[in-house]
Amino acid sequence: MRSLKKELQIQKTYEMLFALEDLREIFRQSLPTGFSDKEQEDFSNTANRIKSILSELETGEGKPACNRVGCLDARTREEEFINIHPIQAAGRLTPEGRKAVISYGDGYSTCDYCRKPFRLDKITRPPIEEFHQDLAKFLNMEQARVVPGARRGFQVVTQSLVERGESVIVSALAHYTEFLAVEVAGGVVKEVPPDQENIITAEATALKIDEVKAKTGKLPKLIMIDHYDYQFANEHDVHGISKVAREYGIPFLYNGAYTVGVMPVDGKKIGADFIVGSGHKSMASVAPSGVLATTDEWAKKIFRTTQMVGDLTKRKFGVKEVENLGCTLMGATLLSMIASFPRVRARTASWEEEVKKSNYFLEQLLKIQGSNVLSEWPRRHTLTKVDTTGSFDTVAKTHKRRGFFFSDELKERGIIGEFAGATRTWKLNTYGLTWEQIKYTADALLDIAKKYGLSIN
Ligand SMILES: *Cc1c(COP(=O)(O)O)cnc(C)c1O
């Protein structure tokens, strides 16, 4: 069961953080020469408040404070619970990322030292230009830009390559944002069907291309395939598909929303023309953030600069990139990406261990009779779709809380992130949990099963 002491200490930590912000605000309101008497008094009062919070924080005693900020509750899920939410796991900030948020939260905080040519990716202080080079290197591509989410990366490419009515090949397991990115460009999606194992193969992709050619008389303009899809997190044959793309002379976009930032991704090895990643899904960054990387050749097209001239003023804006609308991530989003990056880059080397934990966890779940894994097995990812229709759902059928009994039981044990109320098919992600947390969570599932008399193998 959850520790009440820990819960209070978390509350006190937030109370302390917020009090420190109050202290910080006094600096912001005062003159460079120092405090007025009133400010000095405020400062001392706030400092004393912080001291008393600290002593309560240390001992874990005292009354919980109201940590609401206006209409917002303090979000303490990551501190209080083990979170197995399918899309949140690898987007949790690193401590460095959180510090960057505190420090660079102000609006245009990236722009303190913006000099000619006045473009985000050219700023050297903080080292944003260098970060762009690091990103390109990290993905083994030639150029990279930060974008507000993977979806905006797709959009840059579709709007640059696809004309009205033209076809784009996507997977039948594609994310909705891929559909929308094609739609906004005026294109039409054509889906490659998965095989019986829910895998998108190179052969099926080639067949779909042939079919589109036969029906429309034209080759598709772009192939956009997820390395791991969002529904099952099955691995799809991106290497084979990229080869097919080259044979047909169609550019290939590798969707790494679930890979870039958690496992090694080598754009050259894959043979991708474009690599798209999601900062808030897999790179421990503030939303909305992401990366779009490409080759020097394609960069000319997708990162084309403005040609527009004002009819009255004759103004031109030289190096501003049209698809990026000049600059993209101008504050804490980008700085959180930069601050988290060293750890994100390093953690991709531990991917095999993450997969091992995922498989261990699911092996425990499978001991509960009637439970199944709907994703490919054994797992090659930490996101998984499971089916507990034959186990936990049989309890839900007669329980007065229905499917919510399961979330209640999990929450009581300090686990959240499963879709509340769902006991048939649901998704979970074990990314970033320690072995202790993995074992604890697996034991919790077995414990709940025992409590309700489910059979355990
Ligand atoms: C989450 C996801 C996206 C969207 O990513 P954003 O960064 O939120 O735009 C795209 N494709 C796949 C496969 C995803 O899982």
Image (tube, helix red, strand yellow):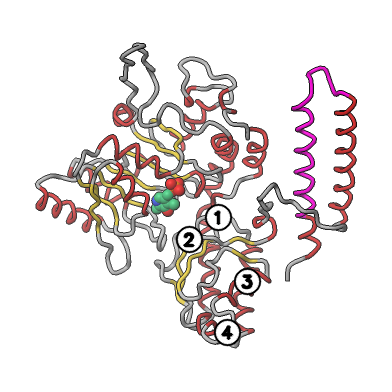
User: For the residue labelled by badge 2, is the local secondary structure a helix, a strand or a loop?
Assistant: strand
Name which residue type carries label 2: Leu
Check disc 4 and report the residue beneath it: 399
Residue at position x 77%, y 49% from top?
13
Among numbered discs 4 and 1, the one appearing first in the sequence: 1
Check the picture and name the quadrant holding the N terminus: bottom right
User: For the residue labelled by badge 3, is the local secondary structure a helix, a strand or a loop?
Assistant: helix
Crowding near pointer 3: few (<14 within 10 Å), some, many (20+)? many
Q: Does the residue at mark 2 contact the one at mark 1 (Cβ under 8 Å)?
A: yes
Name which residue type carries label 4: His
Determine if the magenta segment contains residue 383. Answer: no
Among numbered discs 1 and 3, the one appearing first in the sequence: 1
Crowding near pointer 1: few (<14 within 10 Å), some, many (20+)? many
Q: Which mark is residue 244?
A: none
Relative to 114, does residue 245 appear above or below in the rendering?
below
Q: Does the residue at mark 4 contact the one at mark 2 (Cβ under 8 Å)?
A: no
Among numbered discs 3 and 2, the one appearing first in the sequence: 2
Q: Label 3 vs label 2: CA separation? A: 18 Å
Residue at position x 49%, y 46% from top?
261
Q: Does the residue at mark 4 contact the one at mark 1 (Cβ under 8 Å)?
A: no
User: For the residue labelled by badge 4, is the local secondary structure a helix, a strand or a loop?
Assistant: loop
Relative to 256, does residue 318 appear above or below in the rendering?
above
Q: Label 1 vs label 3: CA separation? A: 17 Å
Image location of residue 296, percent across then percent down:
33, 28
Check disc 3 and report the residue beneath it: 410
Q: Label 4 vs label 2: CA separation? A: 28 Å
Q: Nearer the viewer, residue 447 or 148?
A: 148
Relative to 451, does residue 52 appear above or below in the rendering?
above
Check the picture and name the quadrant holding the C terminus: bottom right
Instruction: Write down the region rendered in magenta.
Output: 10-36
